[in-house]
């Protein structure tokens, strides 16, 4: 398991009876608020340092975007590793972190790396933080599959609003530059050593998953750039065409992040999150060429349970009927 997946741990998920709809209890909602990735334990941060795909993608994007003398702000700096890449390019960096334990940790590590003259670690809520001087590049890695749990969109949106009020409408460059949210129907083995457990699963991205049979191509349901309007709610009710017969018993969520596009090198630096496989209540056989409707709706930064509660899979035609029927 990639180190980064540790912060993707599923907490308090349970399946209530019902055809397609699952409801969370008040206790689960409270747990989700506490565990939504807002206060990632220190040890998980140490493990995130080992996630070479994640660190390598941000390092490469920072090295191609940051120049000597720039002012870089990192929102949610954690241990400070991403800030260090900008500082090593000669930038002056403000590393904003809310969790006091991490602020102490980042300050210690920044000193140990001799970067204390270039990186200022500021303890603040990034949604409230307003820099003293204009910013060239903003780095923010609060990314989670389907943009659930962590507050990437809320934090960047708030930062942009605060920034425009202070410095006018010319925004800094954001890393990541964009996110693409996709889903697909799958046949998933939920058999674990003979024990049937249809529960949400995280999967490493871009590797063969022998327990998962893809039943259609990926369907994008949201694509946006962070320097444009950022959606705070995601929904889908698009029809999906099956290209592989099988038993549809789960929906896989796949999130790809474009950390930067290097036009000179004609190269995009991307980093996909862990994938999320959510079981559906009533597995159904599907045939090649058949159309099905996958519908869901959830708030950006919301819980896995919120997405699971809203998830509904139906045999096709309902979409066409909805289009035809008056609002
Ligand atoms: C996934 S971690 C990434 C940490 C670091 N950027 C890295 O790449 O290792 C997200 C960080 O954002 C911080 N964070 C979350 N919400 C925040 C907020 N509103 N203001 C400041 N920091 C926040 C968390 O405490 C956590 O350290």
Image: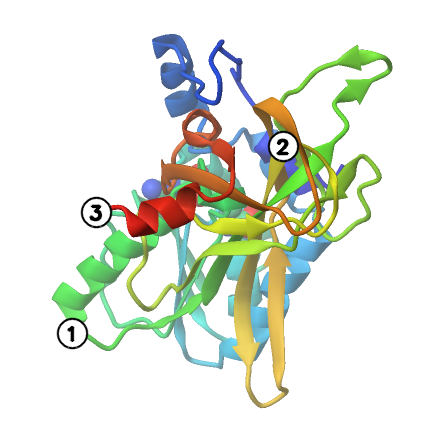
Q: Secondary structure at mark 1?
A: loop
Q: Identify the residue at horizontal 37%, vertical 38% (top origin).
A: 297
**Mark 1 highlights which residue?**
168
Percent across and percent down for residue 249 are 65, 29
Q: CA distance from mark 1 to mark 2?
A: 46 Å
First of labels 3, 1 by sequence position? 1
- Residue most toward the bottom? 264
First of labels 1, 2 by sequence position? 1
- Of marks 3 and 1, the one in the foreground: 3
**Mark 3 highlights which residue?**
326
Q: Secondary structure at mark 3?
A: loop
Return the residue nearer the eye: 272 or 221: 221
- Residue most toward the left? 165
Residue 115 visible (yes or no):
no
209 lies above or below 40? below
164 lies above or below 109? below
Residue 8 visible (yes or no):
yes
Q: Residues within 10 Å of mark 1 (few under 14, many from 20)?
A: few
Q: Secondary structure at mark 2?
A: strand
First of labels 2, 3 by sequence position? 2
The C terminus sits in image quarter: top left
Q: Residues within 10 Å of mark 2 (few under 14, many from 20)?
A: many
**Mark 2 highlights which residue?**
250
Return the residue nearer the eye: 43 or 53: 53
The disc placed on residue 224 is: none
The colour scheme applied to this rendered structure is: rainbow
Question: In what quadrant does ligand 1 lie?
Answer: top left
Q: Identify the residue at horizontal 58%, vertical 74% (top origin).
A: 63
Percent across and percent down for residue 236 are 41, 46
Q: Is residue 96 left or right of residue 64?
A: left
């Amino acid at each position: 398991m990639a180190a980064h997946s540790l912060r993707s741990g599923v907490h308090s998920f349970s399946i209530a009876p019902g055809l397609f709809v699952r409801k969370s209890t008040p206790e689960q909602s409270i747990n989700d608020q506490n565990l939504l990735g807002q206060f990632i334990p220190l040890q998980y941060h140490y493990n995130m340092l080992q996630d070479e795909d994640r660190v390598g993608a941000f390092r490469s994007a920072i090295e191609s975007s940051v120049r000597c003398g720039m002012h870089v702000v990192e929102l949610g700096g954690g241990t400070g590793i991403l800030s260090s890449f900008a500082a090593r390019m000669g930038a002056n960096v403000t590393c904003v972190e809310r969790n006091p334990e991490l602020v102490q940790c980042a300050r210690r590590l920044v000193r140990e790396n001799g970067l204390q003259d270039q990186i200022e670690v500021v303890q603040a809520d990034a949604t409230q933080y307003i820099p003293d001087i204009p910013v060239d590049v903003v780095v923010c890695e609060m990314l989670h599959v389907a943009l659930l749990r962590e507050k990437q969109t809320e934090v960047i949106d708030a930062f942009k609003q605060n920034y425009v009020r202070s410095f006018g409408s010319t925004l800094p460059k954001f890393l990541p530059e964009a996110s693409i949210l996709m889903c697909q129907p799958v046949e998933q083995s939920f058999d674990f050593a003979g024990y049937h457990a249809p529960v949400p699963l995280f999967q490493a991205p871009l590797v063969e998953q022998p327990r998962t049979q893809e039943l259609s191509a990926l369907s994008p349901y949201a694509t946006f750039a962070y320097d444009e309007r950022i959606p705070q709610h995601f929904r889908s009710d698009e029809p999906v065409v099956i290209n592989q017969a099988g038993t549809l018993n789960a929906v896989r969520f796949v999130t790809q992040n474009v950390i930067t596009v290097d036009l000179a090198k004609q190269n995009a630096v991307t980093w996909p999150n862990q994938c999320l496989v959510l079981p559906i209540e009533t597995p159904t056989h599907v045939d090649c060429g058949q159309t099905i409707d996958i519908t869901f709706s959830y708030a950006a930064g919301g819980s896995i349970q919120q997405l699971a509660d809203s998830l509904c899979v139906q045999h096709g035609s309902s979409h066409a009927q909805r289009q035809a029927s008056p609002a």
